[in-house]
Amino acid sequence: MAVIAELLVDDPAAQLRCRDELTERGDHLPRWVSALPRAEVYRAVRRTNVFGDVDELVIGMRLDDGHELTIAVRVDHNLWSSVIDAGAVPESIDETLTCVAETSSDVSVFEMTLADARAWIEDALDKPALAPKTDTWPLYRALVQWLVGRLPEGGERRPPPGDPEVNEELCDAFFATSSAAPFIEHSHRDLLLELFETGAGDPLRSSSARVEQALGSASYNDVEMPLEVALDAPDLLRAFIPYAHAQSGIRDELTSRSLAMVDAVRSSYKRDVLRQAEYWHLDDAV
């Protein structure tokens, strides 16, 4: 109950009831439990895959008795930058990072200030819970909220993805290539700019998961875009992804996976768009 009381940072009334109950019992608590309020958080890093789809915020803390604890929070930018999982291991952050590095590839690690880590996690916790439940999430939500309370305030939140001016320049460069030759309508440019805004928002990096999300949620409105252009989205992505990945240094094997996903969802995407066009009585435009 003492552990529960410490973790109930988002429910002060329940926290107070637990502490009152503990006081009445007068039980002797293990040292590590009574030491929780004095836990020291000393390091934060961000692990991110080469596509930037998922950030894993890894926090190292030291308990009062010298024991180490590492807590990791996974944030998926294909799901509105919400928390999708969390975990904790009774090891130091150095040991934990060394262990996961042995089984991870295409991952970069960046040091963070503790205040920035708090801002990023708080931001993710505020987003809608869109991910399916796991064995540890949302079970570990109370632990993560307790962790946030141990971190200093005043950090910088994750910067908004995308830069309109940079995206426009990227469009100019792509549409000047032979790969873009089939896409002659100005609306093709608008379509590509819309696709830039999906997932993590980096137009130079398109994972298979991002492609699936971008094309799996087809939305058509004839006021904004001609039907024949909307139907070109898979082919436009298929032409653009190799160009973009060449700019960002994504290796060929990963690019092939992204293109395979384009091919896998092309038919279902077009069916969805045509179904929406028919709903709006626009089937005669096909």
Image (cartoon, rainbow, N blue to C red):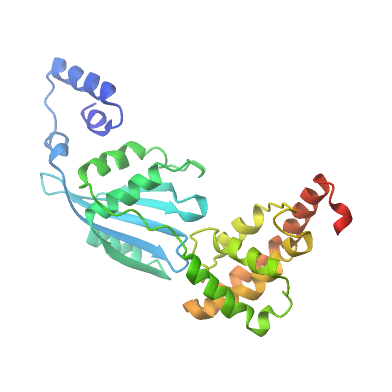
- The quadrant in which residue 187 appears is bottom right
Residue 181 is situated, as x and y percent measured from the top left of the image, at 71, 80
Rendered view: 83 above or below 26: below
Q: Is residue 75 left or right of residue 266?
A: left
Residue 216 is situated, as x and y percent measured from the top left of the image, at 65, 54
Q: Is residue 29 left or right of residue 225?
A: left
Quadrant including the N terminus: top left
Q: Which residue is the extreme one toward the right?
A: 284
Rendered view: 41 above or below 21: below
Residue 156 is situated, as x and y percent measured from the top left of the image, at 29, 54
**Is residue 4 in view?**
yes
Q: Which residue is the extreme one toward the top?
A: 24
Q: Residue at x 17, y 35 (%)?
A: 33
Q: Is residue 80 left or right of residue 230?
A: left
Q: Which one is in front, 47 or 271?
A: 271
Q: Residue at x 71, y 52 (%)?
A: 220
Residue 153 is situated, as x and y percent measured from the top left of the image, at 22, 46
Q: Which one is in front, 80 or 279?
A: 279
- The quadrant in which residue 214 appears is bottom right
Q: Residue at x 12, y 41 (%)?
A: 38
Quadrant including the C terminus: bottom right
